[in-house]
Image: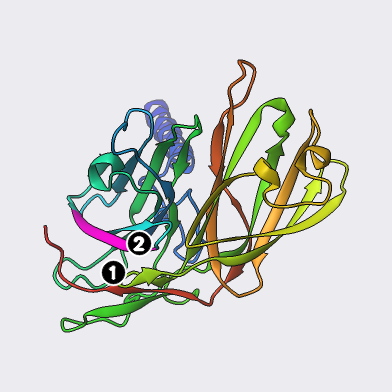
Amino acid sequence: MRTSRRVIHGLLAVCALLVVSSAGFAADPGLAYPAASEVSDQKAGSILFYNTYTSSASAPATENTRINITNTNTTSGAFVHIYFVEGTSCGVADTFVCFTQNQTASFTTSDADPGTRGYIVVIAVDGLTGCPANFNFLIGDEYVKYASGHAANLGAEAIAAIAVIPADCGASTVATVVNFDGISYNRLPRVLADDSIPSRLDGNDTKLIVNRVGGNLVTGAASLGTLFAVVYDDAENTFSTSFSGNCHLEFSIGAGNLPRVVGGWNALLPAGHTAWMKFWSTSDIGILGAAINFNAAAAGFNGGHNLHKLTLSNANSYVVPVFPPAC
């Protein structure tokens, strides 16, 4: 009888340990990030958006961009259509990359599209037709450096497909529409914010990068037009301004009083102070962007981040060409 009790007590202890272990540790990695969660650089998606790329054709060691794309699916390969959008003309060049499961790919834009500045769009497609596909397993990031000294590691903004078939497309389709409407794919930001603009009088040079997400990736991407901005200093004073750009805009905040504010940026933002800014278009357009700060002083802070997203729009789209992957 004593032996039986000991056995029973031992079995109960083992069972209790198993219960504790199963409660503390999942048997698998868990649930996938919800597809309906909005655009973010912290999740996987079917579309990746890289806010900037640049390279020097003659001196790639001083100005270049390294692009990384990863297929996180453990069982299935991936086919991606990559669009390089030139920031001035908004013209588009494209190529395909094909992945096995768990594969990552890296390349420099000095090899892929030398001497060009703009943004990059990566869209998961069907391997037979080239139609946009629901494949929410793509992640990516980029390291960009400019000859001016600006440099940053920026995550690719991931946009998930929500619908099982996210675009109206078939074997005979030559072009289709990718809708960022919260039904086919995630919505896009309409209002962006840069939450930390340091003073130029402390040696800072903050490059602001803004992109229009939309238009036609067959004939040319759409332009930003004019954006309205509100600037708040650290004493809660408010200033309004505006700036304009094409599909891809880059400028140093406060250089040449751009964007223009009453009294000038040095008066708005004296040494030792910071400000923040939010901006949007009077039209309902989708925008994404980043900010990169450079300070040559030994005590200066350098680096960058994607801009914060404050409100969303469901009225944006891309027209994309459709043809089978060439890989």
Q: Is residue 102 magenta?
A: no
The residue at which mark 1 appears reads as 133
Residue 96 lies in the magenta stretch: yes
The disc, 2 or 1, on the residue closer to the chain's N-terminal end is: 2
Pointer 2 and pointer 1: residues touching (CB < 8 Å)? yes
Total number of numbered discs in the rendering: 2
Residue 134: where, in percent of width, then height?
Answer: 32, 68
Element under disc 2: loop
Which amino acid, mark 1?
Ala
Q: Amino acid at mark 2?
A: Ser
Residue at x-position 21% and y-position 68%: 126
**Residue identified by numbered label 2:** 46
Asked if 18 appears above or below 218 in the picture, the reply is above
- In the foreground, 135 or 159: 159
Q: Circle 2: is it few (<14), some (14-19), or many (20+) Cα within 10 Å?
A: many
Report the front residue among 159 and 283: 283
Q: Decide which of 65, 13 is in the foreground and name it.
A: 65
The structure residue drawn at horizontal position 67% and vertical position 43%, both measured from the top left corner, is 256
**Coordinates of residue 229 in the picture (x, y in percent):** 71, 59
Q: Which residue is situated farthest in the front direction here?
A: 256
Magenta: main secondary structure equals strand
Q: What range is drawn magenta here?
A: 90-97
